[in-house]
Amino acid sequence: MQPLNVALVQGATRWHDARANRNYYSSLVNSIAGKVDLVILPETFLTGFTNDTANQHELVNGEWLPWLKTLAADTNAVITGSLVIKEGDQYFNRLIWMRPDGSFDQYDKRHLFRMAGEHEHYASGSQHLVVELKGWRIRPLICYDLRFPVWIRNRRLEQSEGGMEYDLVLFVANWPAPRHEIWRTLLRARAIENLSYCVGVNRVGTDDNGLLYAGDSAAIDPLGAPLLELGAQEQVITVTLDSEALLAHRKRFPAWMDADDFELI
């Protein structure tokens, strides 16, 4: 596991304007080209958080795909964030993990935000995703997933260098300002209980539903201490995650050895 340079791109997503958002996020990401290994964008970064899936979706092979492939290649970094995707007759809040070589993985949001009616417009995912980057095993998730620790629970995995299923859990989000203390608290909790780094990237600004987003994007170490915390304005900040500190903590405090085993059904 080499040091991992991560960029938190806390943007003010334009409402229902994919072209404007492609231009906007391209400008933010290009400012750090060649300097990082992983770029994290907010949830639904081409539209804002919307239930207008019929009019605001992207197709599986739509314009987003060559754009994101080119952006990852030009940046020489993995780029991740989520989009509104139509596949067949269903819509998904889908996270894309785009590599510089144009290959990618995907994760469909498991927990749909009932209080905003997301479950009435999107299909829920059923598979979790763990990806590798520079020797790190990484678990990417989406917004409301943050509230469900069983789905996120890290597991012992002897064949990994870190001894666990993943070393970094990350969340892309559109998390409204009135619940920002919950966001901050749960990011720390997920790091502590899973003996991993935790990074959350939220958007800023106000959307056309009148919801204010306060940012509060953060990188948290395995003990729950913030490595950095962003404010409520547009920011692109990088942080280096140290694998030696992570492995030393797991050796010094091996709580994972006493964890309860379980199976999701």
Image (cartoon, rainbow, N blue to C red):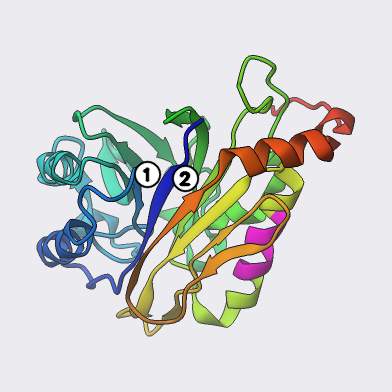
Residue at 65% over, 41% down: 246
Measured from the top left, where is residue 70 in percent x and y? 11, 42
Q: Answer few, some or many: residues within 10 Å of disc 1's Cα (few below 14, many 20 plus, some between 14 and 19).
A: many
Hey, which residue is sitting farthest top in the picture? 159
User: 46 above or below 157?
Assistant: below
Q: What amino acid does circle 1 point to? A: Leu
> Residue at label 1?
95
Residue at 32% over, 78% down: 207
In contact (CB < 8 Å): disc 1 and disc 2: yes
**Region in magenta:** 183-189
Q: What amino acid does circle 2 point to? A: Lys
Q: Which mark is residue 109?
A: 2
> Split into 4 quadrants, where in the image is the C terminus?
top right
Measured from the top left, where is residue 30 in percent x and y? 17, 57
- Residue 126 visible (yes or no): no
Is 62 situated left or right of 172 in this image? left
Specify the quadrant of the image occupied by residue 224: bottom right
Hey, which residue is sitting farthest right in the picture? 258
Q: Main secondary structure of the magenta part?
A: helix
